[in-house]
Each structure stands twice: as structure tokens, then as C-alpha cells.
Amino acid sequence: MATIQQIDPASVLIAVDLLPHSCEALKRGYTLARDIGAPAVVLHVVHETADNPGFYRAHNKQNQTTPMRDIADTMLHEFLESELKNLPTSTQAVKLDNLLVEGIPAQRILEVADRINARYLVMSSNGHGKWGRFWSGSVVEAVRKQIRCELLVLEPELEHPIMPSEHSLESMTPAR
């Protein structure tokens, strides 16, 4: 795990939340870094809230609590171990670092992007759509408003389209 001081400037920053939609952000960010000949950094922000003051309950026999950062570090390594084998292969290797920071995700992503002078930021939306963002806020929207580098946001395909198809509209038309 790198520290922010060890990160190469002008890297492609890939922000992940370790959920399934982050896999595509990792793949696209890695490919972008390879194509432009830049290093890449996978960033995960541990979001500590007032409800979760620093500890998760570990799933072990002792039933101990474990600092969130330690669990997030393990989760990030497992995510990378699982997903790195799915990345496109090439003769040109990409230097890939990972970075784990704590704080409010949008603020910390912006801060890291500025501190490393990122060339690009690649991240994925969680797919909640317009109404989900309205109710719960959106890291992507907060970042989009303030980012100073190029931003690539991957939007997941919706499993259930918001607008019904023509066929379903016909079936809802009252009989005459």
C-alpha cells in the first residue's frame, strides 16, 4: 500500500467503493493508464460516520471489534486480488499502486486527485439513478462539480428501465 507522497504525479486515479460496479472502473482506468503510458492508483475511501465511530465487528471466533481501516485494507486487497486477473493483458505493463484513506468520500477523492496532480479520475456511479441521488446524495455528483482533471464516470446499466417499453404501454391501455 502506497502513501500519498509515494504516488507518481500525473497518474490515472481510479476511485473504487469495492462494490461490483467498481470492477468496470478498475478495468477502464487500467486500460486508460496503459493506453496513455501513465501509472495508475486505485483509491478507496473508508467512510467513517457518526453511526460507525471507527470499528466494524469482525467475523471471527473471538467476536472482536476491528478498526474499520484494517477491515477496509483487507477488503481492498481481496478486491484487487480478485479483479487484477480480469484486467486486459498487454506487453506494456502499468505501474499500479493502491491507496486507502479515511474521510468523506467526495472530499477525499478531490483532495487526493489534487495532491497527486491526477491526469484523469475514473469512477463508477452506483446506479441509483436520479431519484436515488436526490435522496441519498451522490459522491459522483459532488466530485463532478469540483474536479480539476479529466473525469470518466461509468454509469451501470439499469436492470429495470425507468420508462416502460411500448409493449407494456399497450398492455396498460384500457380496453374500449
Image: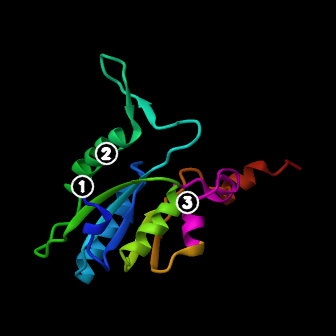
The image shows residue 55, relative to residue 94, as above or below, that is above
Specify the label residue 59 is tagged with.
Answer: none
Nearer the N terminus, badge 2 or badge 1? 1
Q: Nearer the viewer, residue 110 or 154?
A: 110
Q: What amino acid is at disc 1?
A: Met
Quarter holding residue 88: bottom left
On whether residue 131 falls in the magenta region, the answer is yes
Q: Quickly name the residue at label 3.
A: 139
The one of 10 and 27 positioned closer to us in this rendering: 10
Would you say residue 143 sits in the magenta stretch? yes
How far apart are labels 2 and 1 at the CA level? 9 Å
Q: Which mark's residue is nearer the viewer, 1 or 3? A: 1
**Which of pointers 2 and 3 indicates the residue nearer the eye?**
2
Picture residue at 50% right of the left edge, 44% below the top: 48
| Residues in magenta, as a range | 126-144
Q: State the image quarter where residue 138 is shown.
A: bottom right
In space, the residues marked 2 and 3 are separated at their CA atoms by: 21 Å
Label 1 close to label 3 by CB (< 8 Å)? no
Question: What residue is pinned by disc 2?
Answer: 73
Residue 19 coordinates in the image, percent (x, y): 42, 48
Q: Is residue 158 above or below residue 113?
A: above
Question: Mark 3 or mark 1, which is nearer the start of the sequence?
Answer: 1
Q: Secondary structure at mark 1?
A: loop
Q: Residue at x 37, y 80 (%)?
A: 119
**Whether label 2 touches label 1, CB < 8 Å:** yes
What secondary structure is marked by label 2?
Answer: helix
Which mark identifies residue 1? 1
In percent of the image, x 25 and y 80: which residue is there? 35
